[in-house]
Amino acid sequence: MNATVDSSGAVRYDLGVLCAFAGDVLRTTKMRPEDARLLARSLVEADATGVATHGLTRLPAYLAQLRAGQVNPLPQEKVLAETPSAVLVDADRGFGVPVGVRMIDRLLPKARETGVAFGGVRRVAHFGAAAFFTRRAAEQGFLAFAMSSTSPSVVPFGGRGPRIGNSPMSFAAPGTDAPELVLDMAQSVSSRGRIKVFAAEGKELPPDWAVDRDGLPTRDPAAALAGGVLPSGGHKGAALSLMVEMLASGLTGAHLTQDIRHAGFTAAGTPDLGADVTVGNAFLVLDAAMFGDAAAVRRRASDIADHVRRSEPARDVERVLAPGDPERARFAATSESGVPIAPATAHSLDVLAAELGLAAPLPLNDDQGALNGRGREHGTGAVFE
């Protein structure tokens, strides 16, 4: 079989095959089948939408955390407080994807009843790509925010050394036919995960991404991982980071950034699997029908996005895109040609398969189609139509 390899050297796989394999890997830790399925889907979808830093490259690290007990494979989530429009949950050190999906599903009926609902989660592990949650809500007619506090990785504006988190957040709105204005961003110029990708590929960083231990600008990925990344937009990104931290940790009672430990998978040296890496998450859901006309809200979301798309492109730009368009386009492309996986990550999947006694996922060959519908899992909050 001649595996399908693109111009970057990435190996392409069927999305459903990758989801099944990642789920099998996670279930070896005694994770609940549904939790494993959701977490696997979130990782593969990140690769399918071009967000490889939150994709299957994280599977070996997630497995190590589960095996070591740093992350609880069988968490017993507990409701700590609840009102008609809000709920606070202790995640018992479980991964953020399963508890986050359950939180969104818990908030939707509250928002239908009250118009708006807020959910907080404390003692929760990494929650992956935040748009996984907001798209789920938008597909069901709700506007949504999702955000997380993180360990210190960002240098405050005017400071030296990492002291604040990159505080990822996402927003999505229901559009006429699909979620619109889907943004997913950290409050840093780049994530540590992306810098690690540059390190693995032996590439220099773009200027103005990071500083070294001494607070000096650097393009060396290793020096950046030992130092800190810069906030996006200078003082504005730093301020947004603190806003997210206040909502995700300050309000929920989760660890503040200065108390969150980094496991070290995106840094040099041996990961610290004994550290408390739990963070806080926050979710806000608004019913598009809050003011009586959900269809009009959907049309306005699409109108806002379309107005941007109709912009005259600058020189050397093919067309102007709205937030979420690149990810939707990449997902459509993977439906035709398969999910691209970097060679190092593809190798790690083979290593995991051999270690765990599982069948390794087979790449697509040059003569195969890609998904043929097998990857479209309804009910995950992760379907692009």
Image (spheres, rainbow, N blue to C red):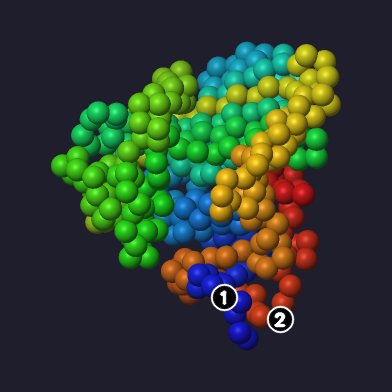
**Which residue is pictured at 66% across the width and 62% down the height?**
334
- Res 12 quadrant in image: bottom right
Label 2 environment density (alpha carbons within 10 Å; few <14, some 14–19, many ≥20): few
Decide if residue 376 is in sight here: yes
Q: Which mark is residue 97?
A: none
Q: Which mark is residue 5?
A: 1
Residue 24 versus residue 7: which sits nearer the camera? 7
Residue 239 versus residue 134: which sits nearer the camera? 239
Label 1 environment density (alpha carbons within 10 Å; few <14, some 14–19, many ≥20): some
Q: In this view, does 200 lie above or below 266?
A: below
Going by the numbered disc 2, the residue's amino acid type is Asp
The quadrant of the picture occupied by the N terminus is bottom right
Asked if residue 178 lies left or right of residue 197, the reply is: right
Q: Do the residues labelled 2 and 1 touch (CB within 8 Å)?
A: no
Q: Distance between the residues labelled 2 and 1?
A: 12 Å
Asked if residue 380 lies left or right of residue 215, the reply is: right
The residue identified by callout 2 is 367
Q: Is residue 368 above or below residue 235?
A: below
Q: Position of residue 215 (x, y in %)?
A: 19, 40
Going by the numbered disc 1, the residue's amino acid type is Val
